[in-house]
Amino acid sequence: MSIVEEQSCSYMPDYPQKLCCYNNSKDDNCERTQLRLCPILSTKLLLLIKMMDPNVYIKYNRLQNELTKRFCKDLTLDPDWREISLKTVMDIGCGPGNTSTYWMDHFFPKIQKLIGVDIDPGMINLAKEKNTKKNIEYYVADIMKKESLQEWEGRIDRILSTYVFHRVGDQKMAFRNLFDLLRDTGVASIGFLVKGPFYFAFRDLLETNKWKPILDPTNMTYPEAMVKGYDLEFYRQLFEDIGFSVSCCEMRPVIFSYESDEECKNLLLSLHYLGEVSDELKEEYKEDIFQQFVKHSPRDSEGHPTHNAIILHAKLTKKKL
Ligand SMILES: C[S@@+](CC[C@H](N)C(=O)[O-])C[C@H]1O[C@@H](n2cnc3c(N)ncnc32)[C@H](O)[C@@H]1O
């Protein structure tokens, strides 16, 4: 049974994509079957699940912190979010809780229950340790795996998800699960990357003789929109086909200036789990990926590195059947 499937790629034509790593829905039973049948393989698969190092991410996520602050602040202007004083809100892919969950709680202090879920147990442990509050609960769950979400099906009033859906192996499956989580007329506000310089930089690094043997390409999921060239119309249609009423679906450019080269290098380090490599090699990775990164995202007028990406924002309402 193969867990890797190669697909051609329009934005990255020379780069075969490994679309079926641990979380591809085409053979959703694949991982579970293998976990049951082969404990040695299961350890390998569980290792593949680690996409980011939670301790590095929590330290260097000023970019995500700024963006999620803006995202949640904007929701305070939305009448569907303003009236959520007593409802159940879920943050999908909450990470260590100091970005999207923090800002959701900050701008909507009357939420009765805020549920943060993340695929990575390390992220959830860190969230429980560092970002707890009486009304906030954290759980390990995978938006690609319906069975991990069953207890909340049809019970969530509002969903927030920032910078997560470009990390899943099958967006259609993930959006279907999102739909099932919402109660009738429930609303999801999501933002995810359509195109970003980190992924081009990582791809370029993988093509170098130095990094090819070190980096594990199966440990990287490229944004589906980048790989398959999906446009806005594609997503609007996809959301409608699933059963959502789409009141906003737009692509917005994001330009974020880093305070220094070092800040940008640390952010780049936080975006991908390198495995158990030496600190020296981590430093080299930071330097080398940064050199590739600035080719795809030019410095600002003051010479600071920037993060120049395209984000898809959508507001989706579950239609009453
Ligand atoms: C870039 S972080 C974003 C965290 C937070 N939402 C923010 O905006 O800062 C992406 C998070 O999504 C989580 N994630 C990736 N795939 C997921 C999946 N299939 N189900 C749930 N969480 C997932 C990762 O573990 C990681 O914590």
Image (spheres, rainbow, N blue to C red):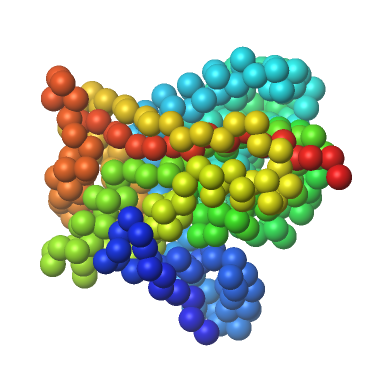
- Residue 290 visible to an observer of this rendering: no
Quadrant location, the C terminus: top right
Residue at x 37% of width, y 44% of height: 195
Image vertical order of residue 279 relative to residue 70, above or below: below
Residue 224's image quarter?
bottom left
181 displayed left or right of 239: right
Q: With respect to residue 151, does 260 lie above or below? A: above
Q: Residue at x 54, y 49 (%)?
A: 234
> How many marks overall?
0
Find residue 112 and report its image quarter. top right
State the residue in front, 154 or 321. 321
Q: Position of residue 143 (x, y in %)?
A: 62, 52
- Extreme right residue here? 321
- Looking at the image, residue 218 sits to the left or right of residue 241; the answer is left
Tell me where residue 270 appears, x and y as whole percent. 34, 44
Q: Return the residue nearer the eye: 27 or 52.
A: 27
Q: Residue at 27% across / 25% down in the picture? A: 257
Quick one: which residue is furthest to the front in this view?
Answer: 233
**Would you place residue 305 above or below residue 148 in this image?**
above
Work out whether residue 212 or residue 193 is closer to the camera in this orientation and state it: 193
Q: Position of residue 233 (x, y in %)?
A: 53, 45
Residue in front for this viewpoint, 79 or 240? 240
Asked if one can make out residue 86 in the rendered structure from this viewpoint, the answer is: yes
Q: Position of residue 284 (x, y in %)?
A: 15, 51
Residue occupying image coordinates x 30% and y 34%: 308
